[in-house]
Image (cartoon, rainbow, N blue to C red):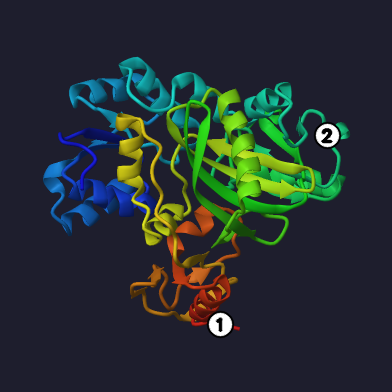
Amino acid sequence: MKAFDNQKNLMMLGVCPEQFPFIQELLDDGLRIIFCERDKTNINKLNNILSEAHYAKSVIIYECDLADKDRILNIAEKEKVDALIPVPLGKVFSTVGYINSQLNLPGVSYEACLNFTDKLKVYNLLKENNLNCASQWNATELDKVVFPCIVKPRFGCGSRGVKTAKNFNELLEACEFCRKDFSATIEDKDILIEEYIEGDEYSCDFFFRDGKAEIYCFLKKKMTEIPYRQEVTYEDNALNDDEKATIEDYISKCAKTLKINNSVVTCDLILSSKGPYVIDVSARFPGNFVCSIAKSKGEDLGRMYLEFIFNKKLPQLPEPHLKAYFSMFNIGSGKLLSVPESIHTANFIAENNLKAGDEVKAVTNGRSLLSRGYALCLDDSIEKAKKKVDNYLKMFVLKD
């Protein structure tokens, strides 16, 4: 059953292939989507996907700079946009809040976007409100740093420029890596150095309205080996009632402090001996194919989001019956001699974009990993699901 009686015009800034599963569901429901994208390659990918289906009349694509707020505001007014779908954008995500605030649309505000797109501002606001947060410095005060630590760009995303350091020499190397991997023109004050918090890391995704958080996806992450910090696997992590209450209380206070309201929120959390710590937070849907994991468990995120922002209801989540294990292709480095075929069955999906003869490099950030594909398995235990995914990954054969 549809959540709406009338057609809505939606806008999405940026073309994110990992969001296509729920975009297609919205289009199937008769909703119209206006895309704004600056990258011609991404526009061509979207056109190829749409041309294979029956969505052409439901989609309009504008080629434009996503940082040009007034240009996109004019497009939103022209197309009579009812809401924006918030997806990963990095620093230019503030355009989403700008459009919402200018046109009084439902969703995250411009003020909130200016807060959470600035990692330094996040730290300062959380610290001022006595909420757990990692100690932070910048590259102008290297003599104050406590080891181990993590170096990251102030306005970064996708793990670009992120590297850990255990001593001063590694710290200097990590700062240089940040310049090389993120931006050669980044200023020292915008190279942040963060305390390394010990504990397991999780992806926590929730709906947030009026101080109330409803978690719809909570996944334990496995990261690349130090010194890099890119997630490569996710697995379901069931929370007991006490754990859920503690985490929801903490993330609700964080969202409220950052002025987030009436939005989906994604955050990276570390659960330490001192409680939960937010590592990163944004008022948007998650990247890294987490939406595909949610969909595999029966969560229709697109419709749930529209029900949430238009009908002002926290969604009713389906009761999961199977456990999900997800892995991107962190398969080493070298020339591929053979690769497995893609697979699409009820409880196992493998999307492989690699082919024999491709050269793969060691993973350092999301950009070096996301385009390869992924494997996702549902089973009655994490152990069974993981074994099936691991067996698939073994079919990638590299030249010795």
User: How many residues crowd around disc 1 within 10 Å: few (fewer than 14), some, or many (20 or more)?
Assistant: few
Residue name at image x 78 percent, y 28 percent:
140
Dot 1 or dot 2: first in sequence order is 2
Amino acid of disc 1: Lys
Q: Determine the CA span between mark 1 and mark 2.
A: 42 Å
Classify the position of the C terminus by image quarter: bottom right
User: How many residues crowd around disc 2 within 10 Å: few (fewer than 14), some, or many (20 or more)?
Assistant: few
Name the front one of labels 1 and 2. Answer: 2
Residue 119 seen anywhere in this rendered image of the structure: yes
Q: Horizontal placement of 261 versus 76: left or right?
A: right
User: How far from the left and from the top, in percent, is residue 191?
Assistant: 69, 34
| Residues at circles 1 and 2 in contact by the CB criterion of under 8 Å | no
Residue name at image x 53 percent, y 28 percent:
211
Work out whether 307 lies above or below 140: below
User: How far from the left and from the top, in percent, is residue 149?
Assistant: 78, 44
Which numbered disc covers residue 399? 1
Q: What residue is shown with label 2?
A: 142
Residue 179 seen anywhere in this rendered image of the structure: no
Residue name at image x 64 percent, y 58 percent:
223
User: How far from the left and from the top, in percent, is residue 335?
Assistant: 52, 76
Can you tell which quarter of the image residue 399 is in? bottom right
Q: Nearer the viewer, residue 312 or 230?
A: 312
User: How far from the left and from the top, in percent, is residue 14?
Assistant: 36, 40
Can you tell which quarter of the image residue 172 is in? top right
Can you tell which quarter of the image residue 30 is in? top left
Q: Horizontal placement of 177 versus 207: left or right?
A: right
Disc 1 secondary structure class: loop
